[in-house]
Image (cartoon, rainbow, N blue to C red):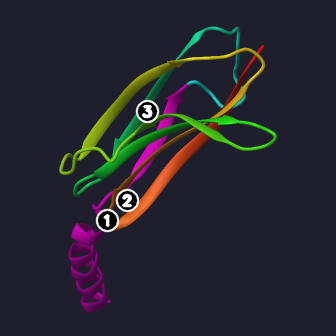
C-alpha cells in the first residue's frame, strides 16, 4: 500500500506542470448578447483575452448584419504578439434598426479562438 501511495504521489507531481497551462480564454464583457441600444448611440466594447504562454493576433470585427449581405464596419487586427493578457477596449456609433455581430478573437497555444455576440438598435 505504501508503494502505491508513493507512486501515486510521484505521478501527481509529474502531472502538475502540465496541468498549470491555461488554455486561451476570450470573453466579451460588454455589451452583452442580445442587448438593445437607442441609435445613434456609441456602443462600447470591452473584452479580456488570456493565455498562459503568449497571445497573438488579437482582433475585433464588428459586422452590420443585413438581409442581403453582411458589412464589416470595424476591423482591428491582427494585433501584437507576446503578452499573456490583453484587455480590448473599442467603440462604434450605431445606426437605427440595425443588428450587429461583434467578434473578438486571438490565438494562443497554436489555436485560434473567439467569442461573439449579437446586439441591435431601435
Residue 81 magenta-highlighted:
no
Q: Which mark is residue 47?
A: 3
For numbered disc 1, what is the local secondary structure? loop
Q: Decide: marks 1, 3 in contact (CB < 8 A)?
A: no
| Viewer-nearest residue: 24 or 9 | 24
Tell me what residue is drawn at x 81 percent, y 40 percent: 67
Circle 1 crowding by C-alpha within 10 Å: few under 14, some 14–19, many from 20: some
Q: Decide: marks 2, 1 in contact (CB < 8 A)?
A: yes
Q: Could you give the CA–CA distance between mark 3 and mark 2, rounded to whole angstroms?
A: 16 Å
Mark 2 and mark 1 lie on one chain; the one further toward the N terminus is 2
Q: Which residue in the protein does label 1 denote?
A: 109
Circle 3 crowding by C-alpha within 10 Å: few under 14, some 14–19, many from 20: many
Mark 3 or mark 2, which is nearer to you?
3
Q: Quadrant of residue 100?
A: top right
> Left or right: where does residue 64 sit relative to residue 66?
left
Q: State which region is magenta.
A: 1-30
Mark 2 or mark 1, which is nearer to you?
1
> Left or right: where does residue 28 sit relative to residue 122?
left
> Left or right: where does residue 96 sit relative to residue 63?
right
| Viewer-nearest residue: 38 or 66 | 66
Q: List x then y, in percent, for residue 80.
A: 23, 45
Above or below: residue 34 compared with residue 17: above
Amino acid at each position: 500500500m505504501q508503494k502505491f501511495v508513493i507512486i501515486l504521489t510521484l505521478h501527481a507531481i509529474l502531472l502538475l506542470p502540465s496541468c498549470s497551462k491555461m488554455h486561451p480564454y476570450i470573453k466579451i464583457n460588454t455589451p452583452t448578447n442580445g442587448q438593445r441600444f437607442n441609435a445613434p448611440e456609441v456602443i462600447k466594447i470591452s473584452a479580456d483575452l488570456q493565455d498562459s504562454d503568449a497571445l497573438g493576433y488579437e482582433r475585433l470585427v464588428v459586422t452590420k448584419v443585413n438581409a442581403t449581405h453582411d458589412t464589416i464596419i470595424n476591423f482591428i487586427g491582427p494585433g501584437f504578439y507576446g503578452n499573456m493578457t490583453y484587455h480590448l477596449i473599442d467603440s462604434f456609433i450605431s445606426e437605427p434598426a440595425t443588428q450587429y455581430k461583434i467578434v473578438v478573437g486571438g490565438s494562443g497555444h497554436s489555436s485560434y479562438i473567439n467569442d461573439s455576440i449579437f446586439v441591435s438598435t431601435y
